[in-house]
Image (cartoon, rainbow, N blue to C red):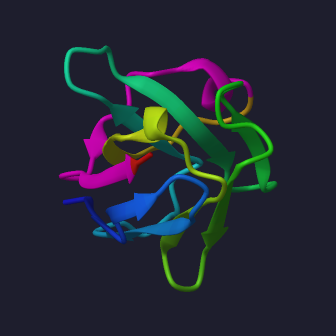
Amino acid sequence: QVQLVESGGGSVQAGGSLRLSCAASGYTTSPGCMAWFRQAPGKEREGVARIYTPTGSTYYADSVKDRFTISHDNAKRTVYLQMNSLKPEDTAMYYCAADWFYGDNCRGRTDFRYWGQGTQVTVSS
């Protein structure tokens, strides 16, 4: 059974930084695609960043480009989201997702089968 456990959320002032972690377990072959999504109250879930683990290719939403960085440590089975220059509009519940998507499927698909429980990020002005 694949499990994803997020950590690292919290409260920070605008301009600050946080690093989210997502520890994965319950599989033999690493998921081809791991991602971070977020959902603010009253808003739809939004894809924030993805990483294609076989190559390390990364994809970002325009709203976080040049501020957030996704990375993956295969040995630790952990995916990270480094968030810098945080803004109040980044406030949301952040979720880790994983699936065995390969190639361009990692870039566009949203139907991940495996999700974490979420970690709250609150940015005050």
Please tell me in which quadrant of the rendered image residue 93 appears.
top left
Q: Is residue 8 above or below residue 87?
A: below
Q: Nearer the viewer, residue 27 or 70?
A: 70
Q: Nearer the viewer, residue 70 or 26?
A: 70
Please tell me in which quadrant of the rendered image residue 53 appears.
bottom right
Residue appearing at x 40%, y 50% in the figure: 123
Position of residue 25 in the picture relative to residue 46 (left or right): left
Q: Nearer the viewer, residue 114 or 10?
A: 10
Q: Is residue 6 above or below residue 76?
A: above
Quarter in which the N terminus is drawn: bottom left
Residue appearing at x 81%, y 54% in the figure: 55
Position of residue 35 in the picture relative to residue 64 (left or right): left
Q: Is residue 55 above or below residue 47?
A: below
How far across and down, in percent of the image, does residue 102 sit? 65, 36
| The residue positioned farthest toward the front in the image shown | 125
How far across and down, in percent of the image, does residue 70 sit? 65, 56
Magenta residues (range): 104-123
How far across and down, in percent of the image, does residue 11 sit? 32, 62
Q: How many marks?
A: 0
Please tell me in which quadrant of the rendered image residue 41 appears.
top left
How far across and down, in percent of the image, does residue 18 sit? 50, 67
85 falls in the magenta region:
no
Residue appearing at x 50%, y 28% in the figure: 47
108 falls in the magenta region:
yes
Residue appearing at x 57%, y 50% in the figure: 86
Q: Is residue 26 above or below residue 31?
A: below
